Every structure is written in structure tokens, then in C-alpha cells.
Amino acid sequence: MTTTPQAVRRASPRTRRKATPAAPDPSAGLMPQREPVRLLNPDGTPLPARDDYPEPPADTLREMYRRMVVGRRFDVQATALTKQGRLAVYPSARGQEACQIGGVLALRDTDWVFPTYRESMALTARGIDPVEVLTLLRGDWHCGYDPAVTHTAPQCTPLATQCVHAAGLAYGESYQGRDTVALAFIGDGATSEGDFHEGINFAAVFKAPVVYLVQNNKYAISVPLSRQTAAPSLAYKGVGYGVPSEQVDGNDPVAVLAVLERAVAHARAGRGPYLIEAHTYRMEPHTNADDQTRYRDAEEVEAWRDRDPIARLEAYLRARGVLDDAAVAAIAAEAEEYAAALRRRMDAQPTVDPLSLFDHVYAEPTPQLVEQREMVRAELAADAEGDA
């Protein structure tokens, strides 16, 4: 076979076209791991150490255990107060202690927390007076504590509105050169709300130092996760906004704190927001007004008892020699005294001025409001004369 000069030219290395380099993966560094991060087995035995998520110090984990035990006792006591009529409503977080306490421990006191209505346990772990935490749920018109002093926003009842608030505050703090991170607690149902998407998109565009912690407890009241989203995991929702994301076993306290610490460090370094999905479960109904038997069976709830985050951490710390019987008993006694003090203080009825109903309704009271207030004032005066 004869080779023509033209064929030689086509085969020459000088004229051969160079391969086009592959375009960079736009999702690099954004994708969550396929399986939730886990550092402890459900029985508390450790899994192999990981370089990407180093284990927090032993004394930090011991403090986490203490706050989780006290937090659960507070939660149980608040549930009992609701049944006794001393609270109007109470959304329990029992079973979600690792997320509640981990979120607080990962922050500095100068950082901000944006809670939902279910974060009462997290607020008490942050050092806020438990009676002040329960003020709103008791039926008062204000949140009880001072947000500016505690760096904690009022508990948010509308779904996902705190996502926008957290993004705005975090951006404002960054704009003014302050070293502040905001953490927004949200539930799985909140990721279906527009405010979640608006908040995380704003935070991504302006690199606001905010961490979104989604506590995926499998139900938005009675709506299961399968009816909320077709995404393989809620953590993947961050990718579309250019936000790095991760998913974690929300009942593994060690993993939850390790993932949160990395996310907070990411935000604090000026690298923008971070999205975490914690897979967990609420053991109690949505609130005391909820009939959970209508949408989940007892077998499902019972299966999650074996994944108890407190028992899991206790077993691990005992095996490491960080906890013993005496320490566990002392923490349990502290939790009982905390609950007893809360009961005593909640027994005292607050002094309420009926005329305060008309305060802060309008900047300038309307004529109708003034008329109604005077009617109430007259009725109170008449009652006082009758009792004299």
C-alpha cells in the first residue's frame, strides 16, 4: 500500500488537533455525600475516624451530653405543663436533642440564632431563662426574652420566614465588618416554602455567613417527606443555588457537632452560606393538638427509640471513660432540679393588665380602638367598685 504525502500530513503530530480539556465540574465542592455523615453506630460504638470531620474534644462532647439531658427534661416538663393547661401549646423536640444542642454548641455567644417554634430546647441550652422561653407559648404577646441581648431572634411560627431574616442579618453584620455567623433552624416542611429559597439564594449571591440547619424529622405536621419533594435528599437543594451542602445522621451527636463546626467555620471564613440536612425524628406529636396516630403507626415510632441520641452519646462517653455512674447521676439530678424550678416558677400566675390588649395594635390608635379601650376601662372600674 502506497502512502501519499497528503495522508502523511494528516497523521503528522504537528497537525494533529489537541484534545480539548474537560470543563470544570460546576458542582465540585457543593454536593453532599451520598450517605449521611456518621461517626457513631446506633449503639454508641465508634466508626473509623475521618479526616474531613474530626471528632470534637471529649470535654465538649461531655458538655453536649449534659445539655442534652437537661434539655430533654425541660422538654418533658414543658409537655406536662401543656397537659395541665399552663401552656397554650407546646411543640416537643424530644428525639432531636443532638440537632438542638449541637446547633448551639457550634456557635459563639456573639453569633445569632434564628429558631422555629420547636427550638425551645436549643434556647434554654443557649442560656435563656426557660420561663422567658415559654412566655410566647403561654399566650403573651411578646417573645419573652430580649433578642438583642441574647442574640436570638423570636421563635418563628410561620414556616421559613426566619431564613430570610437570618440571611439579612448575616449580610448586614458582614457588611459592617463584624465577625458574626447566623444559624437558622428549619424543618423539612420549610424547604417547600418560598422564603427558604429566597433566603438561601440571597445568602449565596451576597456570601452571607449563615448556616441553614434542616432538621428532617420526616413529617411536615402530617405530610411525609415523600409528598414534599422528589429530591434524593434535602441537602441537594443547596446545589442549585451554589451553596455547599451536607447531610448527617441527626441522631449521632458527635457527627452533628463535627458537621456543624465545619459549616460554621466555612461561613465565618467569608465563604458564604452552608446547608445541612440532619436526618432525625420527633418522638412526640407535632404539638399537643396533633393526633399522630392518623399518619404514622406506633411501630415506626418505636423503631426510632433504638436510635436515641442521648443513649448513643452516653454509651460512647462511658466507653471512653469520660462518663461514669456518678457523673450520669449528677447530671440527671441537675436536670430534675431544673424541671422542679421551672414548675415552681410556672405556678406563679403573671400579672396581666387587660388594657395592654390595645397596646401596639396601631402606631396611632384608631377611633374604634380608643372606644373599645375606654369600654374595657369602664368595665374594670365598675368591677373594682363592686368588689370594694
Image (cartoon, rainbow, N blue to C red):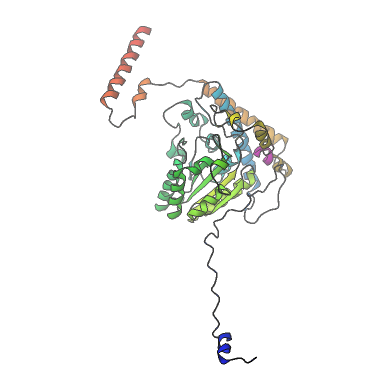
Q: Residue at x 53, y 59 (%)?
A: 27
Question: Which residue is pictured at 62% across the width and 36% down the height?
Answer: 95
- Measured as percent of width and height from the top left, residue 276 is found at 55, 48
Q: Is residue 195 above or below residue 268?
A: above
Confirm whether the magenta stretch covers residue 352: no
Residue farthest to the left, as pictured: 367
- 376 or 30: nearer the eye? 30
Q: Position of residue 238 (x, y in %)?
A: 51, 51
Residue 5, quarter of the rendered image: bottom right
Q: Quadrant of the C terminus?
A: top left
Q: Closest to the observer: 135 or 193? A: 193
Apparent side of residue 94 relative to residue 49 in the rendered image (left or right)? left
- 363 with respect to 172 (left or right): left
Q: Is residue 370 above or below residue 383?
A: below
Question: Does the magenta segment cover residue 307?
Answer: yes
| Rendered location of residue 146, percent (x, y) | 43, 35
Instruction: Examine the image and state in which quarter residue 21 appears.
Output: bottom right
For the stretch drawn in magenta, what is the main secondary structure? helix
- 184, 36: nearer the viewer: 36
Image quarter in which the N terminus is found = bottom right
The magenta segment = 306-313
Q: Is residue 388 visible?
A: no
Q: Is residue 87 visible?
A: yes
In this picture, residue 146 sits left or right of residue 17: left
Residue 110 percent location from the top left of the image: 48, 45
Q: How many numbered discs sit on the rendered protein? A: 0
- Closer to us: 305 or 309: 305
